[in-house]
Amino acid sequence: MTNKEYGAPVTIGDNCWIAGNVTILAGSKIGSGCVIGAGSVVSGEIPDHSVAYGVPCRVARAVTDHDGLEYHRELF
């Protein structure tokens, strides 16, 4: 009604994987190498190399070397 809008920049680091139906709110920061689970709502800061999901999106664990494809031959 007042023609005023407020926003903040969204920052997404390099080499991130963001699943489907993820909502990223204004002012959010997603670090490099992160994995964001499907249906999550990111409303804050997600540190580098983290696996995060949920509403609101929270860090579940860190991304490790064991997450690499060389450890998961069943995916080939």
Image (spheres, rainbow, N blue to C red):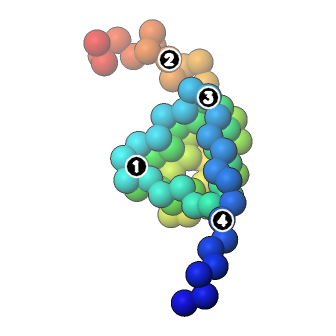
Cα separation between marks 1 and 2: 20 Å
**What residue is rendered at 37% in x and 53% in y?**
21
Q: Name the residue under label 3.
A: 14
User: Which picture quadrant has residue 47?
Assistant: top right
Q: Name the residue under label 1.
A: 38
Q: Is residue 10 above or below residue 65?
A: below
Q: In the rendered structure, which disc, 4 or 3, sits on the residue that comes first in sequence?
A: 4
Q: Is mark 4 on a helix, strand or loop?
A: loop
Drawn side of residue 18 relative to residue 14, left or right:
left
Q: In this view, does 1 lie above or below 5?
A: below
Q: What element carries label 2?
A: loop
Within 10 Å of disc 2 (Cα), the crowding (few <14, some 14-19, many 20+) is: few
Q: Name the residue under label 4.
A: 7
Q: Position of residue 70 (x, y in %)?
A: 45, 9
Within 10 Å of disc 4 (Cα), the crowding (few <14, some 14-19, many 20+) is: few
Q: What residue type is labelled 2?
A: Gly
**In contact (CB < 8 Å): disc 1 and disc 2:** no
Cα separation between marks 3 and 1: 19 Å
